[in-house]
Amino acid sequence: MKKIFNNSVFTFILGVILTTTITSVLAFSIFSNDVGFTPTDNSWKKEDGSSIENVSDALDSLYKINNGYTDEELKKILDITGDKVDINDVLTTNFMSKISSNKAAAKKMMDSTYFRNKVNVTLLNALKTALVPTLSNNTNVIYSTEYSSNWAGWKAFIEASESWCNVNGKTTNQYIGYKFNTNVNVRITKFLNGGPQSYQAKTVRLQASNDNSTWVDASDNYTLANTNSTVYLFNTKLDESYQYWRVFIVNIYSSSYVEIGGLQFYGV
């Protein structure tokens, strides 16, 4: 029989196989040490060898070990599994409810780029981080002006087809917000830009204060679409708690009014 491989070729191939195996083992070992479980080719495995059925369970295990995760850690979890894991497997109401009792973990989730890219009110409500209670009057509501009692400040916080509206002709430097009984750390703000009359804000930003006088920016300016739409403002500048939070309206599209509805502050 004709000799196909000589000793040097065989040695080379064996070396490649051993190097690849050792590298893979080390990679899984490093990953396992970081987050407490190891992904295999076919399934997730805990360090004790027991199976993890899905990425939500895997992340749940991570929370128990590290009390949260960074964007880098989450990206590692998603990337290492390749096409087998989608961010939508993580961003579920079931998984949100698992971590809702851990405020530190909930905050890290709200600050995650992955969460913010997919944010919606269902996920936010599942996290149980809404800070403004159900309102029926202007107690604790702060606002620049209001058109009438039918368009009162507190109606900005109603999800139904009502809204707050400012007075005619005030086209710049308007605001709507809330005074909390204790200091809170708002991470995400949601509202409907426009209302029954479709008067939209054009440029807005999130602000915070401890005296309702001196305000600090919690976000850069957002330029919004000239259409009724749900808007999410992300706190990108502050990581402290304040008593007053507001949506500051730099300018509006109309020459008369602005309407805001469905407003809610989410945080810890």
Image: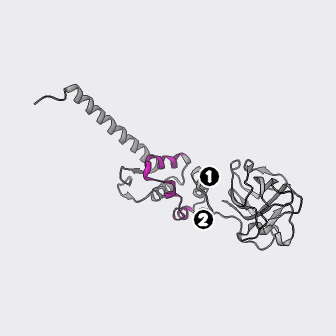
Q: Tell me the tag on residue 147.
A: none
**Residue 189 in picture, x, y percent from top left:** 70, 58
Residue 140 visible, this angle: no
Say which residue label 1 marks.
111
The magenta stretch spans which residues?
72-99
Amino acid at dot 1: Asp
Examine the image and state in which quarter residue 190 appears. bottom right
Say which residue label 2 marks.
122
Q: Residue furthest bottom?
A: 136
Q: Nearer the viewer, residue 168 or 158?
A: 168
Q: Residue at x 75, y 56 (%)?
A: 226
Amino acid at dot 2: Thr
**Residue 112 in picture, x, y percent from top left:** 59, 51
**Residue 44 in picture, x, y percent from top left:** 39, 54
- 48 vs 116, left or right, is left
Q: Secondary structure at mark 2?
A: helix
Q: Residue at x 48, y 46 (%)?
A: 76
74 is within the stretch colored magenta? yes
Q: Secondary structure at mark 1?
A: helix
- 210 vs 72, left or right, is right
Examine the image and state in which quarter residue 160 appears. bottom right
